[in-house]
Image: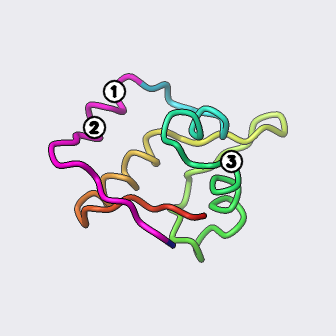
Amino acid sequence: MKNIAIPSGFNPDAFFDNLKGWMSPQEVSETFGYSIWTIYHWKNRGKLAGVPDGLFVKFNRRLFIRTEVLRLWISSQNSEGTVPMNF
């Protein structure tokens, strides 16, 4: 897993205030710049990729990402100064 540096002064909590509670993989990809492959890799690898429990939920065979869990995950990575990235 590779990491990218977070710019100083970035406040992930304020960023997430404007997002809805559930996002599709496509929306997460467009919003955060992760590839669709990375998002599905997180789903399929789960604990091996360090993905938190409860990040993904399925409704009517469609996959969604819980933005609150994503926020907490990014915030915990932010304390280390990095954000998880897979290529």
**Badge 2: how crowded within 10 Å, few (<14), some, or many (20+)?**
few
Residue at the spot of label 3: 36
Residue 43 shown in magenta: no
Question: Is 71 displayed left or right of 28 in the figure?
Answer: left
**Badge 3: how crowded within 10 Å, few (<14), some, or many (20+)?**
some
Q: What is the number of callouts on the image? A: 3
Q: Quadrant of the C terminus?
A: bottom right
Residue 86 percent across, percent down from the top left: 56, 64
Q: Do labels 2 and 1 touch, CB within 8 Å? A: yes
Residue 49 percent across, percent down from the top left: 57, 71
Q: Residue at x 56, y 51 (%)?
A: 55
Amino acid identity at mark 2: Asp
Measured in 3D between alpha carbons, the distance from the residue under mark 2 to the one under mark 3, in whole angstroms, is: 23 Å
Pointer 1 or 3: first along the chain:
1
Residue at the spot of label 2: 13
Foreground of the two, 47 or 78: 78
Residue 66 percent across, percent down from the top left: 54, 41
> Outermost residue toward the left?
9
Q: Residue at x 29, y 41 (%)?
A: 12
Stretch in magenta: 2-18
Q: Residue at x 63, y 57 (%)?
A: 38
| Badge number at residue 17 | 1
Compared with 79, 28 (above or below) is above
Pointer 2 or 3: first along the chain:
2
Measured in 3D between alpha carbons, the distance from the residue under mark 2 to the one under mark 1, in whole angstroms, is: 6 Å
Q: Residue at x 83, y 34 (%)?
A: 60
| Badge number at residue 58 | none
